[in-house]
Image (spheres, rainbow, N blue to C red):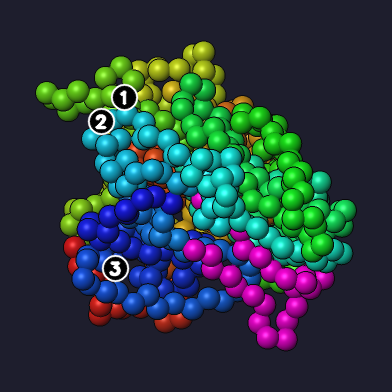
Amino acid sequence: MSKDSDLTTGDCLNRHGVFQKLSCWADGPNMITQCPILPGNKYTYKFKISGQEGTLWWHAHVSWLRATVHGALIIRPKSGHKYPFPKPHREVTIILGEWWNANVMDVEDEAVTSGGLPNISDAFTINGWPGDLYPCSQNHMYKLKVEPGKTYLLRIVNTALNGQLFYKIANHNLTVVGVDAAYTKPYVTNIIMMAPGQTVDALLVTDQDIGSYYMAASPYSTSVGIPYDNTTTRGVVVYDGAPPIATPLMPTLPAFNDTATAYKFSSSLNGLKDGPHWAQVPKNVDYKMFVTVGLGFTPCEANRTCLGPKGTKLSASMNNQSFVPPKRMSLLQAFYSNVDGIYTTDFPAKPPIEFDYTNATINNYNPAFLFAPKVTKVTKLKFNSTVEMRLQNTAIIGVENHPMHLHGSNFHVLAQGFGNYNPSKHREMFNLVDPQIRNTIGVPAGGWAVIRFTADNPGVWIMHCHLDSHLTYGLGTVFMVENGPTPETTLPLPPVDLPNC
């Protein structure tokens, strides 16, 4: 959250994770599928949801406005259909967020102008409340009242702008049954780690002694020497009959840099094979990509003082290409209308130079990789083609966990690990039977992840880091999926009320 969010620049709304089949015009990313809705104007998003169940969310997709403009989007089974697990006594939405004691647009603008890091947040929140560890909220926190011996379905969403978060409830296990609106094999854990943009559905069984138990969320940060919000937000689970003056039990949370715990959670999940809306892993791959993701610099403008390292501005890139959205027309409008001069279709399928990607000793501040060009390069895909992406973190400035989010489609997470991806060694790790299905994957710090998806949704779809500061710096790319052979696989005309730039 933030104080006094400013909507004077216009806004767009995105339904994070909704496929938007044949409704790409309603996807919402600013200057990707539409121009922003200016103050005093309106735009009606029209779309259908099919083939999806679980927890997603919606949020603003202009700058940092999603700090306050967001909410849960719950898709339940159709009438007459059941969950693939015992029906819970109750469903509870848990929204993890971030709070600045400032206008977040000012925070972002200051970072963009100076080229330095944005100011860190002042608090994390659970359902809007920072909790009793913060002076402003000592007498206010989220309370979940429960009955003993019941099962609750927690629908947890990490809406934070830049905070990757551990989440835990004292003395209770959680059984994960879904992530990013895709069912999983039940996975029992006492802790969850979520990157911004990710959702988790988990069953909570109230099987402990009658009392009060804190739920808490604390940061997971992998950037050495980079400031982060090192605070903890907490709410409380209160059993019926608990003494009103009882002190809740506090869970033991991991260290902020506990990559082992974060990786164990993210790599231990499997998809619910043959469950509702299960999609088989595509076996044949039409287009392979090896894509590096990481931070770098851009030169400071003449007669300016910049606050990035060594007097530069911070930047970010994929395959040494730092993405810049167009300014006069959305990419979707240019793609649909065959307008030249807005983008090029030469985004590289591999890095321009092969190097020891995660060796910080060799590559830290290596000038050969530091300054990626600012470009609007995209990848054009044939309808129904299968793409395999090997996402590789780099140590050019420092390794970091990057949550990469794909619009317009889910993907199978075939494998993930640490170090440099080696196809001869790591391909044997591929899970082609029941991999987890996601729309957002945290590429491990100093590691890699391999995903696979089918481009069966005509339109323009951005893939970007869901740490908002990194998207601002250019950590993104775009896929343009061509029409299929029938009217049912062809992108329709744009809406008549589509905003103009």
Residue in the image at 32% along x and 47% along y: 103
Task: Tell which circle, 1 or 3, labels the residue nearer the N-terminal end.
Answer: 1
Number of other residues with Cα within 10 Å of mark 1, as a class: few under 14, some 14 to 19, many 20 or more: some
Question: Which residue corresponds to mark 1?
Answer: 308
Question: Which residue corresponds to mark 2?
Answer: 114
Q: Is residue 497 above or below residue 426?
A: below
Question: Which range of residues does the magenta coloring cover?
Answer: 71-97
Q: Position of residue 121 (x, y in %)?
A: 44, 39
Dot 2 and dot 1 residues touching (CB under 8 Å): yes
Residue in the image at 42% along x and 35% along y: 120
Question: Which residue corresponds to mark 3?
Answer: 336
**Residue toward you, 488 or 471:** 471
Q: Is residue 59 magenta?
A: no
Number of other residues with Cα within 10 Å of mark 2, as a class: few under 14, some 14 to 19, many 20 or more: many
Task: Tell which circle, 2 or 1, labels the residue nearer the N-terminal end.
Answer: 2
Q: Is residue 11 left or right of residue 435?
A: left
Q: Is residue 289 left or right of residue 326?
A: right
Q: Position of residue 410 (x, y in %)?
A: 56, 60
Q: Is residue 352 visible in this depiction of the protein?
A: no
Amino acid type indicated by mark 3: Tyr
Q: Position of residue 153 (x, y in %)?
A: 72, 64
Gap in angstroms between the C-alphas marked 1 and 3:
38 Å
Q: The C terminus lies in which quarter of the figure?
A: bottom left
Q: Nearer the viewer, mark 1 or mark 3?
A: 1
Task: Tell which circle, 3 or 2, labels the residue nearer the N-terminal end.
Answer: 2
Dot 1 and dot 3 residues touching (CB under 8 Å): no
Q: Position of residue 75 (x, y in %)?
A: 60, 73
Residue in the image at 79% along x and 55% along y: 243
